[in-house]
Amino acid sequence: MTDATTDLTDLDSRPRRARLAWAVPALAVVAVAGAVTVPMVATASPSLPAKSAAQLLVDVSQASGTPLSGTVVETARLGLPALPEVGGAAISPTALLAGSHTARVWYDGADKARVALVGDLAETDLVRNGRDVWLWTSGKNTAQHIVLPAPDPKKQSATPTPSESLTPQAAAQQALAAVDPTTEVRVDGTASLAGRSAYELVLSPRDTRSLVGDVRIAIDSETSVPLRVQVNAAKSSGRPAFETAFTSVTFAKPAAHVFRFAPPPGAKVTGPGTSSSAAPEVPDAAGTPKSDSRPRVIGKGWTAVVELPGMSLPSSGGSRDEGSGSVSETLGALTRAMTPVSGSYGSGRVLRTKLVSVLLLDDGRVFVGAVRPEVLEQAAGS
């Protein structure tokens, strides 16, 4: 099968909604993971009818709501320093920045989804059934219940948050959201994975300020559902810096009971009608909530930068007097691996990994993006 390259100015002739607005499991668990390769059996590339990049983008947009269940493995090789674990979940937020994690996924449309992420001795389940959302952590036997607001038909679904990035569908949507005329899109052969044949769609940013070299999306030849997403760092010829893939998948409607959740006996429940139902606030390095912490996005596409205000930078590499695994200890581990910087924006420290750069300023602002550190510094000074 020959390669096909598409200029994004041609794609702009059809509605953006058709390119980008496609179904993603509404709930998934963060799992940015590390050193273990997704288990795949090497097979010859399947022979499939030729399709252009534009055709595949349309096909993916029309795969909305395809029911499925399967097993997903997510892997990241970001080169982060060792971080302490925070929290009592099966997979804590910092643990998800390294290692390899496997989850079972069930999906039946935008309002019915379940992810079960299993650790060594604990499990975390995230379940959505209509407007009801449950997050259960077996290690602490806690369950958080959230009732979502009624959907607004005039608004499109929001781009997945980091906590919705486990499945190939969600990761692919985030990549496709960056598609614009600065992106080269092409078809690069076919692949076999999870026992299915797929087309390989490749997105390559033309902006050299991005740390992303390209994004490869394996699209199922029958259902057009993304089966695997691989992100390669710029100027890197090794293994993908990030990947998420189905190792097994079945395209059938999951049983209704999969999406019914009841807290187990003795579980501590928070949510509507309980005394701890208020929305959680983002803590600073000392664990103090900051009610004015509101993220801001600067720029767009491949070079977008997220600003997170209201976080205190540890002055001595992080205090350990709050116990192992505190937020302060985590920031301390990061800052010890950072390089001091200063400019018109003030002073702070910067960390660059294969795919992500982080700028922590002494005034409490944090800038994060898949860009070179100088892009973060420009955003901080704007």
Image (cartoon, helix red, strand yellow):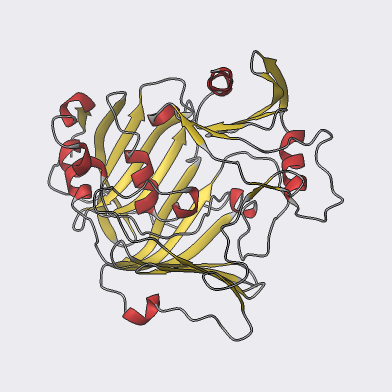
Q: Quadrant of the N terminus?
A: top left
Q: Residue at x 61, y 49 (%)?
A: 98
Name which quarter of the figure residue 293 lies in. Answer: top right
| Nearer to us in this view, 166 or 46 | 166
Spot occupied by residue 9 in the image (x, y as percentages of width and height): 20, 24
Front residue of 151 and 16:
151
Residue 132: image x %, image y %? Answer: 41, 70
Who's the residue at 42% across and 60% down the image? 27
Considering every residue shown, the one lying at the far right of the view is 321
Vertical comparison of 261 with 211: above or below: below
Which residue is farthest top? 344
Instruction: Count all numbered tags in the image, as a single digit.
Output: 0
Point 32% across, 79% down: residue: 256
**Left/right of residue 355 with respect to residue 218 in the rendered view:** right
Residue 34 % position (x, y):
57, 49
Residue 11 occupies which quadrant of the picture?
top left
Give how far across and how far down residue 145 sits, in percent. 51, 70
* In the image: residue 152, left or right of residue 166: left
Going 63% across and 64% down the picture, which residue do you hit?
89
User: Compared with residue 209, is residue 330 higher up or lower down, i.e. above or below?
Assistant: below
Asked if one can make out residue 250 in the rendered structure from this viewpoint, the answer is no
306 sits left or right of 335 in the view: left
114 sits to left or right of 78: left
Most foreground residue, 15 or 228: 15
Q: Residue 356, can we see it?
A: yes
